[in-house]
Amino acid sequence: MDRVDGIYKEGRVILQNEVNWPEGVKVEVVCAVDGDRTVAGEFCEDSSEGLARWVKWFDSLDPVFTGEELKAFETRLRESREQQKGLHSEWERQLGHLLK
């Protein structure tokens, strides 16, 4: 696997070096923060400090739903939970033989 650095500019990733990859090759792009540390590595560090940084980052995000969208989502979520509760005993019956 070749590792190539680049920058994100105007909606595109611009590689800092020429590459000799076949057309259509799949690539993986990871956002780097503070040098070589990745967003996942920075915010998902397995420590209380890492968790606190992740929570701070997460809390800084804009909400996905607001106003009426949020109300509609919460209503659908409640309806779905109630439907699943009703199906629980049937699932247990159908899966019971696997647990024996």
Image (cartoon, grey):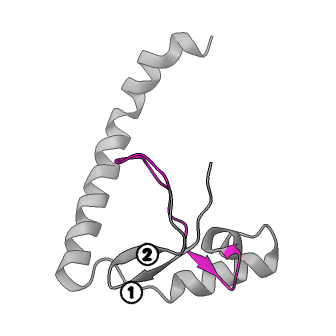
Which residue was labeled with disc 2?
14
Prevailing secondary structure of the magenta residues: loop
| Position of 91 relative to 61 (above/below) | above
Pick whichever, 71 or 21, lies toward us.
21
Along the horizontal axis of the image, is 43 left or right of 76?
right
Q: Amino acid at mark 1?
A: Asp
| Residue at (70, 76) in percent of width and height | 42
Give the x, y percent position of residue 5. Answer: 58, 71
Q: Secondary structure at mark 1?
A: loop
Task: Quote the CA–CA distance across marks 2 and 1.
Answer: 28 Å
Region rendered in magenta: 20-37
Say which of 37 and 42 sits in front.
37
Q: Quadrant of the C terminus?
A: top right
> Which numbered circle lies on residue 62?
1
Q: Give percent across and percent down for residue 47.
A: 82, 72
> Which residue type does callout 2 highlight?
Ile
Task: Give left or right: position of 39 versus 76.
Answer: right
| Residue 88 position (above or below residue 3) | above
Task: Tell me where residue 91 sits by quadrant.
Answer: top left
Q: Is 28 in the magenta?
A: yes
Q: In which quarter of the view is residue 68 placed?
A: bottom left
Looking at the image, is mark 2 or mark 1 earlier in the sequence?
2
Q: Is residue 99 above or below residue 8?
A: above
Relative to 12, 3 lies left or right: right
Label 2 SS: strand
Callout in the foreground (2, 1): 2
- Relative depth, front residue between 91 and 27: 27
- Nearer-the-camera pick, 47 or 12: 12
80 shown above or below 93: below
Q: Judge whether residue 97 is colored magenta.
A: no
Report the residue at 34% width, 33% height from top. 87
